[in-house]
Amino acid sequence: MLRAKEILDAALELEPHEREQIADDLWGSLEEGYDRASIDKAWDDELARRAKELDEGRVELVEWDDMKAKIAKRLGER
């Protein structure tokens, strides 16, 4: 049996649309056994909570490139 790293390496050689399909299928397999309506409601609630925090000025948006750099810096410090 292939190890996860070997599978990932092989998958990364695929075309983007093929990788997207695999990611979608894997994600879907994690949701099996869960009530789809409950999952959707939980996401809706989370989005509403985050939007409220933004509207109230309790949080602010960060550019993705800035956040990636911050994450990379933190990982490099380990």
Image: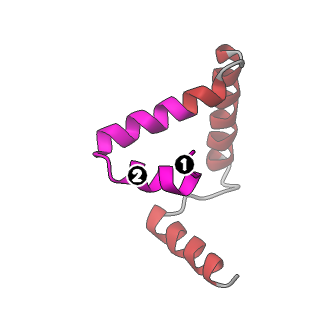
Which residue is nearer to you in this view: 14 or 48? Answer: 14
x then y, percent, for residue 10: 40, 51
Mark toward the viewer: 1 or 2? 1
Q: Is residue 12 magenta?
A: yes
Residue type at the position of mark 1: Leu
x then y, percent, for residue 61: 55, 58
Residue type at the position of mark 2: Ala
**What residue sits right under mark 2 in the picture?**
10
> Which of the marked residues, 1 or 2, is nearer the chain's N terminus?
1
Seen at 66% across and 14% down, the residue is 37
Seen at 62% across and 41% down, the residue is 51
Q: Is residue 17 magenta?
A: yes
Crowding at dot 2, Cα within 10 Å, few <14 / some 14-19 / many 20+, comes out as: few
Where 8 sits versus 45, above or below?
below
Q: Which residues are magenta?
A: 1-26
Q: Quadrant of residue 19?
A: top left
Secondary structure mostly taken by the magenta-highlighted segment of the chain:
helix
Q: Quadrant of residue 33?
A: top right
Q: Which of the numbered marks, if any, corresponds to residue 2?
A: 1
Residue 54 located left or right of residue 21? right
x then y, percent, for residue 18: 33, 38
Q: Are marks 1 and 2 in contact (CB under 8 Å)?
A: yes
What secondary structure is found at the residue carrying circle 1? loop
Residue 17 located left or right of residue 57? left
